[in-house]
Image: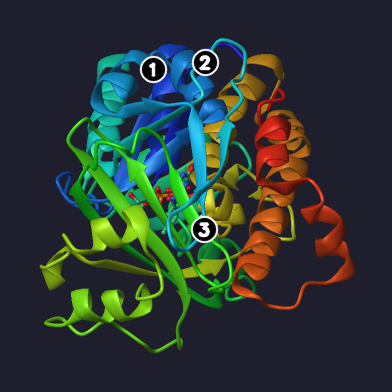
Amino acid sequence: MTPPLRVLVHGGGIGGLTLATALARRGHQVDVAELRDELEVLGVGIIQPSNALHVMREIGVLDACLAAGFEWEVLTVCDPAGATLARIPQPRMGDAPSNNGIPRPALAGVLSAAATEAGASLRFSATITGLDDDGEGVDVTLSDGHRGRYDLVVGFDGIGSPLRRRLYGDTYTPEYTGFANWRVTLPRLPEVQGVVMSAGNLKAKALLTPITDELMYLGSVFAEAEGFRPDREHAHEQLAERLAGFGGPIAEALAQVTDPSAVVYSRISQVTVEEPWHVGRVVLAGDAAHASTPHLAQGAAMAVEDALVLARSLDDAEDVATALAAWEERRRPRAMWVQALSRAVLKQETGTPTTPEEDELLKVGIPGAAHVLVQPY
Ligand SMILES: Cc1cc2nc3c(=O)[nH]c(=O)nc-3n(C[C@H](O)[C@H](O)[C@H](O)COP(=O)(O)OP(=O)(O)OC[C@H]3O[C@@H](n4cnc5c(N)ncnc54)[C@H](O)[C@@H]3O)c2cc1C
């Protein structure tokens, strides 16, 4: 389709800002409505695997991501005591780097600057309050009083997606997996030159991920009751109890965790929209459509792939309906594969019984999955 299309992106997270940048660079008129104040991004880190970095290069922000993060290539696997079991080089997608660890606020800064520079309009503290799709266009009212008519509305509004609820009611609500992630940002240990993963006979896993020259984060997954929340004053001790069986670099990192307020606790949930991801001119993407557990570090990678492929589908199609159908046909199998394998890895690593289908999927292994994911998206 010939620009300019008028597009509203609901949610200015990782996927939404990537889409806004990709579309605005093509000459489309893009508004982004983001609920939060622009400064509020959770201060932990994220891994950008090679397929995500490939998208970053395509939208022109690869160098900025690498400059703000820590590029790495080798995954080190240790036993719980800290003895190195394997050093596994990670593949590249084309000439994109292998991996980059980056603080989430830095990534948000890179993407919001790129979207603005490309010409997108970012509206913070804004959410959809009214939406009417009459087939020819979508009339939208935002909470900040803005009204607009759009050719396309994209819900990149995360796992709790209010737009998903608007389209499908309560049919798709996030399902808690029974596991939660504990993360703490710490000074980087010199030996942490890439992800160091410690796993084995403890039915738990702990990771150290470099995110800048100075910083890394300690992340770990444990079974937790749905209603559990860490104690505000003792979260660091609660984490220490859970990681008591780990030695080596994990124990060394843990010794630095003395501030309970530095501990970030996230319950791990997932959701899959089984019906088509679009209704008329309103479409869901990223976590809103297919949030997975973080066990392959691919959730944001899938969101940015969704974004770029959507922009390309709009380039190639004659109308919005054809673009959305072509986009979903391309995206659903890959996103569902990541989701199913991520869930199976969670079960395997935590000693939860797996199904025969999951056993089949798990044959690829995490290193094998990385090779699958550097194939074209
Ligand atoms: C513990 C953990 C670790 C992870 N680690 C990795 C990793 O290393 N690598 C990786 O690729 N992925 C990782 N992920 C997954 C990744 O964070 C998500 O998949 C990714 O952020 C999804 O992007 P998104 O744009 O779809 O949603 P989000 O990034 O969640 O963005 C959604 C946006 O919508 C906004 N929003 C919500 N409600 C409204 C509303 N009503 N109106 C307007 N805006 C709204 C939110 O404020 C937010 O900015 C991890 C996830 C978890 C839980």
Quote the CA–CA distance across marks 2 and 1.
Answer: 9 Å
Residue 209 visible, this orientation: yes
The span from disc 1 to disc 3 (Cα, nearest Å) is: 34 Å
Check disc 2 and report the residue beneath it.
96
> Which label was assigned to residue 62?
1
Q: Earlier in the sequence, mark 2 or mark 3?
A: 3
Task: Return the residue nearer the eye: 175 or 72.
Answer: 72
Residue tagged by mark 3? 79
* Quadrant occupied by the N terminus: top right
Q: Amino acid at mark 2?
A: Ala
Q: Position of residue 104 (x, y in %)?
A: 29, 43
The answer to whether the residue labelled 2 contacts the one labelled 1, judged by CB atoms less than 8 Å apart, is yes
Mark 1 residue element: helix
Q: Residues within 10 Å of mark 1 (few under 14, many from 20)?
A: many
**Left or right: 75 as drawn, with respect to 125:** right
Residue 77 placement (x, y as % from top left): 53, 47
Q: Is residue 82 above or below residue 331?
A: below
Q: Is mark 2 within 8 Å of ligand 1?
A: no
